[in-house]
């Protein structure tokens, strides 16, 4: 199964454009399979080797009689995450809690699918024996492990089973307290047995079969009464019809590469979704509530899987550069790899909303057009950030240039914001929200250098040019990070119906009255950008510096002669314009070290960013 992989130029360019098609996905899948097998070899050769060996031997035995069953497990949702956990995070290599032992549960799945006889010991945790892809045995008490015996019917060995199990095998679970026998058809519930449901969607000749994975050891036990397998099945069927009808090429990709849905606990608001770079084709998501949201989630998250697999084969960027970057779709700073992942994943959103904005009518069309314009602006700003701050390789530059071409082509079909005054108004509203969001992000995460701010204050008081600005300092996020808050959310919502921003002069006066109010700076950044004021870029990309300088100058006014009125507080619009004085070199206007990448064709995409 292990082999070298050559990524043809046309496949690389097709993936960079956002799709790639079924052949590209199959190539990435084969390459990821080789990677997983190499990780298995590393686990066998490492400190967990003795714990891994029995399961690896069983997998090898299955591969000899039923290669497809072994491949389905190695390609499946749990194998890559098991390997990563074992090689990197195992807490007890030689103890009873060694993560290497969890491979036994996956080997059981392979044996069941192949109807291959097996006897292997599997860990039990909190009275539960989890068999990813099959189900969970409950009520096993204090037993630390169980012996799982797979017995095949005469002549059944090598017969492929279903995703959920194989009716031609008998599975026994033995502990010191006694024996459990799984149902003859493991896809059906039984006493103390909770099977993994398999969702099945078919439309126009394309089939999607996905286990609703609830038996992975690291997952919480979820209450599924309000969104059980039947509800997921109905939702997936509708989402699949939407995808096949409106995104046929991407539906072919999903049919080739998706391998499971992992249900997550519902967040307080919205939908939570994610992927693991180690689990190609697996989507983690809370209950999406409607088929459109599920379709969008599948498109978005599969983009992450594709890029993760692609970066196993090519290097898009080198270490170094800024470690914490602005991504307009996230409330927290992102590393270079996270920024590139977000840009690429939003290409799925872009395709989705482009189609919806052209096929909907009335308020639904207006909402889709807003989301399309906002998504495009997010991707464009992300491309600008990557070009300026990420040390791209030659392949990385080519990748983003091809991606940028896709973004530029979005409106050529006449969908989205469209032309005329309505389209212009929508573009202005999106630009306002994005400028305000970035300003709030800067105030939250970026710290102004005290010595640099004092130097600038002295130069301002002396009437001299600002010169080079202090270097950026973006703090790292720790723990869970919430969004910018309800005040910004209300302001952003109002922008969708606003004809224009608040006048910049009025916004500047409000900032002077309450310099610590982040929302005021958001409005000022948006207004300055819309009015094309000098210094608008600084108000947006170095907001923390303008605020710190404004506060410092207000607090420490120079002594005035008797009988002379003291000077008023510094005007933030004038300060921002001064900070972009032509006396400063281009690369220092915003304190950003500009690379040659920033002058690449990617710069063409920054019209709304």
Image (cartoon, helix red, strand yellow):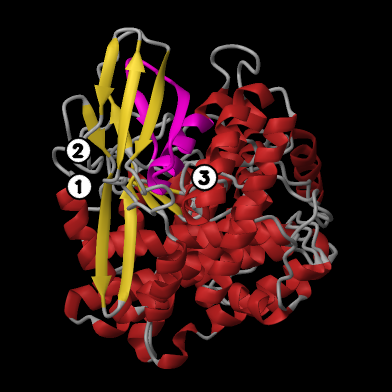
Query: Can residue 542 be seen by looking at this rendering?
Result: no
Task: Identify the mark nearer the N-term, 2 or 1.
Answer: 2
In what element is the residue under mark 1?
helix
- Residue span colored magenta: 103-132
The residues tagged by marks 3 and 1 sit, at their Cα atoms, a distance apart of 30 Å
Tag 2–tag 1 contact (CB < 8 Å): yes
Give the left or right position of residue 39, taking residue 102 as reference: right
The residues tagged by marks 2 and 1 sit, at their Cα atoms, a distance apart of 8 Å
The residues tagged by marks 2 and 3 sit, at their Cα atoms, a distance apart of 33 Å
Q: Position of residue 234 (x, y in %)?
A: 17, 59
Check disc 2: other Cα within 10 Å, few if <14, some if 14-19, many if 20+.
Answer: few
In what element is the residue under mark 2?
loop
Q: Which mark is residue 62?
A: 3
Check disc 3: other Cα within 10 Å, few if <14, some if 14-19, many if 20+.
Answer: many
Q: Is residue 477 above or below residue 298?
A: above
Q: Which of pointers 2 and 1 indicates the residue nearer the eye? A: 1
Question: Mark 1 = which residue?
Answer: 229
Task: Identify the mark nearer the N-term, 2 or 3.
Answer: 3
């Amino acid at each position: 199964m292990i082999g070298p992989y050559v990524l043809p130029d046309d496949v690389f360019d097709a993936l960079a454009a956002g799709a790639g098609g079924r052949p590209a996905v199959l190539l990435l899948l084969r390459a990821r399979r080789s990677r997983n097998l190499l990780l298995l070899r590393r686990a066998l050769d490492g400190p967990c080797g003795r714990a891994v060996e029995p399961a690896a031997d069983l997998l090898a035995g299955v591969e000899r009689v039923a290669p497809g069953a072994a491949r389905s497990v190695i390609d499946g949702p749990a194998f890559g995450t098991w390997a990563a956990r074992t090689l990197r995070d195992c807490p007890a290599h030689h103890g009873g809690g060694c993560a290497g032992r969890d491979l036994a549960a996956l080997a059981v799945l392979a044996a069941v699918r192949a109807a291959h006889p097996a006897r292997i010991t599997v860990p039990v945790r909190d009275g539960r024996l989890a068999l990813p892809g099959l189900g969970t045995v409950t009520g096993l008490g204090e037993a630390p492990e169980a012996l799982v015996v797979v017995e095949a019917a005469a002549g059944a060995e090598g017969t492929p089973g279903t995703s959920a199990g194989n009716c031609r095998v008998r599975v026994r679970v033995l502990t010191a307290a006694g024996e459990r026998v799984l149902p003859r058809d493991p896809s059906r519930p039984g006493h103390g047995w909770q099977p993994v449901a398999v969702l099945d969607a078919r439309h126009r000749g394309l089939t999607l079969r996905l286990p609703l994975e609830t038996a992975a050891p690291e997952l919480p036990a979820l209450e599924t009464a309000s969104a059980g397998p039947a509800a997921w099945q109905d939702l997936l069927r509708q989402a699949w019809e939407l995808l096949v009808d409106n995104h046929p090429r991407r539906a072919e990709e999903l049919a080739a590469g998706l391998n499971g849905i992992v249900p997550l606990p519902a967040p307080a608001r919205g939908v939570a979704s994610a992927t693991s770079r180690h689990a190609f084709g697996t989507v983690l998501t809370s209950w999406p509530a409607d088929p459109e949201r599920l379709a969008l989630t599948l498109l978005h998250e599969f983009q992450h899987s594709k890029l993760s697999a692609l970066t196993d084969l090519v290097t898009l960027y080198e270490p170094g550069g800024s470690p914490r970057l602005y991504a307009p779709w996230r409330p927290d700073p992102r590393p270079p790899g996270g920024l590139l992942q977000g840009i690429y994943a939003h290409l799925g959103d872009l395709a989705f909303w482009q189609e919806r904005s052209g096929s909907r009518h009335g308020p639904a069309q207006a909402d889709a057009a807003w989301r399309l314009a906002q998504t495009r602006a997010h991707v464009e700003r992300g491309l600008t950030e990557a070009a300026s701050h990420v040390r791209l390789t030659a392949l990385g530059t080519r990748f983003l240039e091809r991606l940028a071409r896709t973004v530029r082509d979005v409106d050529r079909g006449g969908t989205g914001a469209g032309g005329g005054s309505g389209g212009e108004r929508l573009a202005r509203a999106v630009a306002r929200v994005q400028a305000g969001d970035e300003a709030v992000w800067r105030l939250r995460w970026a710290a102004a250098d005290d010595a640099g701010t004092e130097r600038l204050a002295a130069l301002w008081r002396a009437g001299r040019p600002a010169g080079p600005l202090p270097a950026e300092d973006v703090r790292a996020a720790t723990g869970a990070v919430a969004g910018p808050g309800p005040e910004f959310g209300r302001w952003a919502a109002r922008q969708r119906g606003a004809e224009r921003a608040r006048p910049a002069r009025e916004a500047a006066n409000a900032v002077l009255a309450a310099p610590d109010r982040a929302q005021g700076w958001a409005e000022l950044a948006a207004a300055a950008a819309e009015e094309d004021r000098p210094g608008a870029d600084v108000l947006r990309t170095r907001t923390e510096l303008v605020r710190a300088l404004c506060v410092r100058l207000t607090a420490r006014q120079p002594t005035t002669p008797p009988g002379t009125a003291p000077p008023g507080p510094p005007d933030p619009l004038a300060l921002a314009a001064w900070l972009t004085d032509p006396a400063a070199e281009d690369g220092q206007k915003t304190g950003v070290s500009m690379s040659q990448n920033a002058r690449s064709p990617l710069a063409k995409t920054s019209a709304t960013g």
